[in-house]
Amino acid sequence: MNNATHIAIIMDGNGRWAELQDMKRVKGHEAGANVVREITTYCSNHKDIERLTLYAFSTENWKRPRLEVEFLMKLLERYLKKELPEYLKNNIRFEPIGDLRAFSKSLQKTISDVKEKTTHCDGLVQSLALNYGSQDEILRGVNKIKNCEYDITQEMLSNALDCKHNVDLLIRTGGDHRLSNFLLWQSAYAELFFCDTLFPDFTTNELEKILKKFKKIERRFGGLK
């Protein structure tokens, strides 16, 4: 049976969840942050899961209303400061991916501090994709190695990316069936699961059901068996 050692989640539906309950969209993001904590704790206690990568803020999310973006930045900084003790308690290493240079100096420092303080943890690796877009990641990776005197290989490009680990299972909540510029290179042979559940309603029970379905899939990676 398959083991999903690297799970990636597109956490979609926070804003719509809030709107359906006549609340401001930011309340959906707050609810989503609580689900991130629950899902991360669940994965850290699952013996087969090694990495959890969550799409938190994309390169395209800057197009959202200014006040919503500002709230998301504050929520992220607050979340990381609050979660640091939980990371340490559960032996979770925090590894952000994305181009962090666009964030405020304060937020960059918080991200860097949490990453540094969890470097010694050797349990689950939780990656938040922050100001992340797969096309941007690939372009930055190419620019790192473009002056190499040899032909660029698949391995060289993989090692130049923010995320150097192939995805086994990619889940998108919220009902849409697209990847939205998330881990395109790493998900070349990922199994894709799309669910209608809005992310604040996504539970560890639903994740467990997906994992059970994943285990039964025959993964051939282009071969016959």
Image: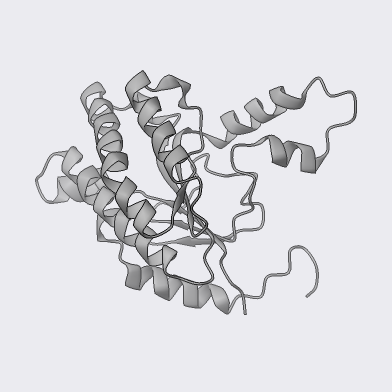
Q: Position of residue 71 (x, y in %)?
A: 22, 30
The C terminus is located in which quarter?
Answer: bottom right
123 is higher (above) or lower (below) than 206: above
* x 24%, y 43%: residue: 29
Kindly tell me whether residue 196 is visible in this rendering. Answer: no
72 is higher (above) or lower (below) than 82: above
Residue 117 lies in what quarter of the image? Answer: top left
> Residue most toward the right?
150
The N terminus is located in which quarter?
Answer: bottom right
26 is higher (above) or lower (below) than 3: above
* x 84%, y 24%: residue: 148
* x 35%, y 31%: residue: 110
Number of marks present in the image shown? 0
Q: Position of residue 7 (x, y in %)?
A: 51, 59
Q: Position of residue 123 (x, y in %)?
A: 49, 60
- Left or right of 98? Residue 152 is right
77 is higher (above) or lower (below) than 16: above
* x 13%, y 39%: residue: 24
> Which is more toward the observer, 72 or 134?
72
> Which is more toward the observer, 214 or 38?
38
Q: Position of residue 178 (x, y in %)?
A: 49, 48
Kindly tell me whether residue 32 is visible in this rendering. Answer: yes
